Image (spheres, coloured by chain):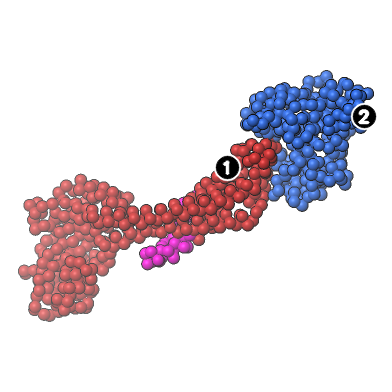
Amino acid sequence: MTTQPLVNPSTSLAPALQVPPQVVLENLVKEYGTLRALGGVSFNIQPGEWIALMGPSGSGKTTLINILGGLDTATSGSVTVNGEDVTRLNESDLVRYRAEKIGFVFQQFHLVPYLTALENVMLAQYFHSVTDESQAVESLKRVGLGDRLEHLPSKLSGGEQQRVAIARALINQPKLILADEPTGNLDEVNEEIVINIFRELHQAGHTILMVTHDVDIARNASRRIELTHGHLTLDTTCNFLEQPKLCPHGKPFPSSGCCSTLDSKSCTP
Amino acid sequence: MSATSANRSMFRRLLRRLLFANRGRLFVILLALSAGAAVSAALLNLQVDAKHRINSEFRSFGANILVLPKSSATSPGGMMTEPQLSRPGLPFDTKISIHAASLLYTIAEVAPNSSTNFLPVVVVGYAGVLPGSAPLDSLSQEVPQSSVASQTKSCIAGQQVAARLDASPGDRLSFRNGNLTLACVLTAILKTGGSEDSQIFLPLLRVQELANAIGKISVIQINASGTPAQIEEYAQTLQQRFPELDVRPLRQFSEAQAKIYSRISGLLTAATTLILALTALCVMAAMTNIAAERRNDVGMMKAIGGSARRVLNLFLTEAVILGLAGGLIGAAAGIALSIALGKAVFGVAAAPRLIVYPISVSLTVIVAILGAYPLRRLVNVRPATIFRGEA
């Protein structure tokens, strides 16, 4: 299976530290009754970053990504995306925000089962503004599904369904791609195909926040954030492939095997 | 392709997919809506037909307004001058249908054929057209003659008087009233079960000559077909125009009409409402299953920017299409069904009433929209709660 490049590599943009952050989370708290899913999380995301959001189950990763994507509301704190505080948006503004600024990729794909691959992509166009079939076809061709346009999701493999979901997420050219364990339901071959697509998106300058439990996948990210019990316990830009398994003081770092600390500078070799 | 037409095309595409996503379920919903529409259309058709039929049946009984001379002081002999109701401006220009006949009653001696055994009989001069009086209407078709007393013309005898005279159709009857005489050929025997059975009917002009009362009549019988209120209003208008006459609506007759229709109408309306309510519940049960199936789809649609309004538009349009299809199929079947039901209820087939068709289809569409309530609730859920599996 080969996929066409999503962009011309020459147009790829590297994250620029000088530019204002694309996303600013400040003291984000989310409570479900007496359960505190997020206990005051704060961090920034620069344009073009690929962040791997990690942590054990129940640590608040999906809650964070849902609030950031306008699918859920915060109990307190703020989430500013491109200068707009998402926590203050009303329902109709949130609909517009999701349609225009966010591209979602879910672990369960969440394709409409009675729509073809092409129609699933066009559905996002329809809710955004105007449907353009040729653009939707082109989008599916980019993820290697040019010959699966009229297939229903039930006739596609898991990897193909996820690629349809990626094409749907990208069709409206969102500023931020939120992926919740996008390879969680895929075999190794399809996982590689999907991750390659994300690599190309990253090279093209897209900002990606990806929830994952897989360290190998997280190594593709330019930065890694880890949550534990709703608190930020790790925020690092260290390169997984080049980092020692042990910290300088000889103790392994919890769950990641990386020696980094919250201060990414201390990871510098 | 313009933006609007592109989105319309996508909207139609989505609708088609929604409708045919599960053909078995589509069939069940269509069946429920069609069955509901069929029964409700049949009952509505019977209801409308019953109104026409009752009016028609009652109308055949004769007059429901009588116009009489006000008193014997102003109208000697209980007669009135006929032209009073023929003058211009007579309020027959009304929205309800009016039929009228002028009658003159007198007593004359009658003998059959060449018999000299004359018997006193009530002789009625008749002119006009009254529903249910078809045999008598033929008397009005005779051309009035300036002097007809000596001519042989047709007449109709009531069953009892014909028996008394031992007369049968084709016999010649002779009449005398003092010096005045006339003759006629008995053309028919009338059997009503009422006072008409002991009367002989002749053209009005002949009886006027026999009674020496040219231009006079005893009563005008009017049959007004309409609601009791319309008939009452018409009688009042007549009375105001002709204060010298006594206009008497036969109220008990109109109220009987209204009472019977009201009972039938109430029964059919209640049955129709019940059927439609049951249909809505059936559709709602099916839609509840659909809502459960589409929960994730709705969450996803909202997650990728679908507003509640746009998602709701899709579902409601789907319900309207189902209602329209079910209504069109069911209403057509229902009108056919009402013909059979009419035979069972009235003993005669109900006539198809076209007004029932759009009403029945509209009611079915409303039922389909009401039945889609579970889908309407679905669009208010938050995507995150659906993805978490809470909703």
Characterize the local packing of mark 1: few (<14), some (14-19) or many (20 or more) Cα atoms within 10 angstroms. Answer: some
Give percent across and percent down for residue A30: 68, 29
In the image, which residues are magenta? B334-362
Around disc 2, counting alpha carbons within 10 Å, would you say few (fewer than 14), some (14 to 19), or many (20 or more)? some
Residue B376 circle label: 1
Question: In the displayed structure, does residue B320 sit left or right of residue B232?
Answer: right
Query: In this rendering, would B34 be left or right of A183?
Result: left
Look at the numbered discs 2 and 1 and tell me whether their residues touch, using CB distance below 8 Å.
no
Q: What amino acid type is highlighted by mark number 1?
A: Arg
The Cα–Cα distance between marks 2 and 1, rounded to whole angstroms, is 56 Å
Q: Is residue B44 left or right of residue B168?
A: right
At x 65%, y 40%, the residue is: B390
From the image, state the color of chain B: red
For this orientation, the residue located farthest to the bottom is B114
Q: Give coordinates of residue B291: x percent, y percent.
A: 61, 46
User: In which quadrant is the C terminus of chain B drawn?
Assistant: top right
SS majority, magenta = helix
Q: Is residue B299 visible?
A: no
All told, the count of numbered labels is 2
Q: Nearer the viewer, mark 2 or mark 1?
A: 2
Q: Quadrant of residue B211?
A: bottom left
- The hue used for chain A is blue
Asked if A189 appears above or below B139 in the picture, the reply is above
Q: Is residue B350 magenta?
A: yes
